[in-house]
Amino acid sequence: MENLGGHGGLNTTMKIIINENPMSAARFKSTSWWKYQDIKNNLATELKLHMIGNPTGGRIVVTDKWVKKSMPSTNLLCLTAKFYRTSNRISDIDNLLKMAMDILQTAGVMHNDDQIREVHATVKKSADKGRFELEINPI
């Protein structure tokens, strides 16, 4: 993978697969808020461990990653997200994106989700196995 000097040492693309059924970001008044926080924090911890070379848990696969010294990114970013859900239950795509961005921020992939300036997202319902497929590129 080519190292792009103009992007603070970031490779062209970081690819992450999270083998967990995508969950919508819960609102603070929702009874599922604590469940959302628990799942988000557990996935973020697993991703962070994966990024530092100590993968555990088995729910996350990172096929290309940025060099450690460029983490977290301060660049403006483009996120391509594909969500595969195991049910036809309605979830707003913006709430699915919020969870993905919360995981990336909590894991230390980026400082803040306001760095994401371009998004391409799709939701596939009734998938055999729920998962997120994320690609992050500096812009």
Image: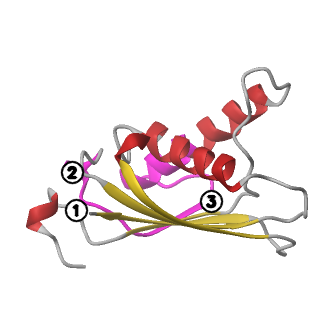
Quadrant of the frame with the C terminus: bottom left
Dot 2 or dot 3, earlier in sequence: 3
Question: Mark 1 against mark 3, which lies toward the viewer?
Answer: 1
Q: Residue furthest right?
A: 88
- Residue type at mark 3 is Gly
Dot 1 or dot 3, earlier in sequence: 1
Left or right of 106: which side holds 132?
Answer: right
Mark 1–mark 2 CB contact (< 8 Å): yes
Residue 69 located within the stretch drawn in magenta: yes
Q: Position of residue 51 (x, y in %)?
A: 39, 54
Residues at marks 2 and 3, CA–CA distance in whole angstroms: 24 Å
- Residue type at mark 1 is Leu
Per the image, the residue denoted by label 3 is 58
At mark 2, the secondary structure is helix
Question: Residue 50 is drawn in which quadrant?
Answer: bottom left
Q: Position of residue 5 (x, y in %)?
A: 9, 65
Residues at marks 1 and 2, CA–CA distance in whole angstroms: 6 Å
Q: Residue furthest top?
A: 29
Question: Mark 2 against mark 3, which lies toward the viewer?
Answer: 2
Q: Crowdedness of circle 3 by 10 Å Cα count: few (<14), some, many (20+)?
A: few
At mark 3, the secondary structure is loop
Per the image, the residue denoted by label 2 is 70
What range is drawn magenta here? 44-71
Disc marking residue 10: 1
- The answer to which of 76 and 105 lies nearer the viewer is 76
In the displayed structure, 115 sits above or below 4; it is above
At mark 1, the secondary structure is loop
- The answer to which of 64 and 125 lies nearer the viewer is 125
